[in-house]
Amino acid sequence: MKQQITDILIIGAGPGGMVAAGYLHDKEISVKVIEKQSFPRFAIGESLIPRCMDNFEEAGLLSAIDKKGYQKKFGARFIRGNETAEFNFSKKYGDGWDWTWQVPRADFDKTLADEIQKKGIDISFETEVISVEKENDDLWKVITKNKEGISNKIHSRFIIDASGNGRVLAKQFRLEAPPEIYDHSSIFTHIKETGRPKGKEGQLITFEVLDTETWFWYIPFSDGMSSIGFVAPNKWFENFEGPEEVQFKKMLEKTDYYKGRFDDHQPIFKPVKLQNISRNVSSIYGKAFALTGNAAEFLDPIFSSGVAFATESSLLAAKLALRELNGESINWEEQYKNYIQKGVNVFSVYVKEWYTGRLQRIFFYDHPNESIKEQICSVLAGYVWDTTNPFVRNAEKMLWNLDYFIDFEKNKKNNVSS
């Protein structure tokens, strides 16, 4: 059995893993990446939010991404019947990026991995983790197997698990925990959109609300492809019978704004169903290891926060691991878990209040306060650690109070008109 020794082993070559690797490049420390799949490979999470840009920039990956000409994302649109709510990232509260990208993840992830390999960091594709255990107090022993069935032993001083839905360490160490959002699933596919509308209609990510808990997404890419899909409670999917392609067409008929638009477009691949999409763990770190992104927790795709949390947590884990290996004492509870949890808690409030309907009432209120809208827009852009923003600092209280005010104003208006 071949043996390797590395300072930091990164599991997963998705955006989180590549941001960690990019940051650690040229830090006088050895880094090894293992990835179960071959690239390019399909992945979900195609709409980024501006906070990602800070992380890609710090990891030295922004230039490589920019050269690819991906569809720029300047905001997001929400539609419910005749109501429309648009958020423009250039009109958000505070500092930060005013735009980001919508990306076909197969190509996007390969772009990141190619750039990391150009920097000289070794990535072993089609390599699966078989076991993880302590060799001694200072080293992990990780047994892997490649596509030829050849086993390999890797000794590592620290492990960053950025394996996404593979959730390698969560499974190895039995860290799985009940999710924040229950009983929601998703189905999606890609289409080659001929005759795509010009301007905003063919560029802007849009979420169409079918009912309080059910919504449809449309994400156009710069290459003419588009991602379309639904998120709903599990019981909603029971209303549709037949093969996935037939079910998906019947679901499209339930839309209002997009009904009929995709009738002549055949799915590029059979619609993919992801059951119970929310994930959680009992701990996101331990002695000489850290879980990042979806390998730790995933809330819901409604606000496109997945890649932002993956890159944020992976970058922070890489920074702290490097400092620890260089002899510094790190308080992982305070400096890692509590920091990441603050951001997760904010987004968790917004996701939960979306599905209670409270946030939807706020979004679709026809006389929004522009200052408040800017503060909410900053949250949607991913700047959920900016506690100068009251809709971050006191997220639940502010949303409840705003919903109460909107309800009061609507009742007052109705009483006057009657």
Image (cartoon, grey):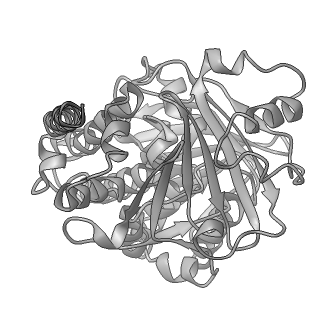
**Which residue is depicted at the point 17% across and 61% down?**
371
Which of 274 and 230 lies nearest the eye of the viewer? 230
Which of 158 and 243 lies nearest the eye of the viewer? 243
Name the quarter where the C terminus is drawn: top left
Q: In this view, does 205 lie above or below 79?
A: below
Q: In which quarter of the image is residue 284?
A: top left
**Which residue is depicted at the point 34% across and 37% down?**
361
Q: Is residue 90 above or below residue 300?
A: below
Residue 97 visible in the displayed image: no
**Which residue is depicted at the point 43% across and 60% down?**
49
**Which residue is depicted at the point 42% across and 41% down?**
139
Q: Is residue 23 above or below residue 233?
A: below
On the image, the x and y values in percent for residue 175 come to: 43, 22
Q: Is residue 69 left or right of residue 281?
A: right
Q: Is residue 362 left or right of residue 180?
A: left
On the image, the x and y values in percent for residue 6 come to: 49, 56
On the image, the x and y values in percent for residue 92 come to: 27, 66
Q: Is residue 201 left or right of residue 329?
A: right
Q: In which quarter of the image is residue 274?
A: top right
Which of 351 and 334 lies nearest the eye of the viewer? 351
Q: In this view, does 142 lie above or below 25?
A: above
Name the quarter where the N terminus is drawn: top right
Q: In this view, does 371 lie to the left or right of 348?
A: left
In this view, the residue farthest toward the front is 418
Q: How many labels does the image show?
A: 0
Residue 34 visible in the displayed image: yes
On the image, the x and y values in percent for residue 223 come to: 74, 73
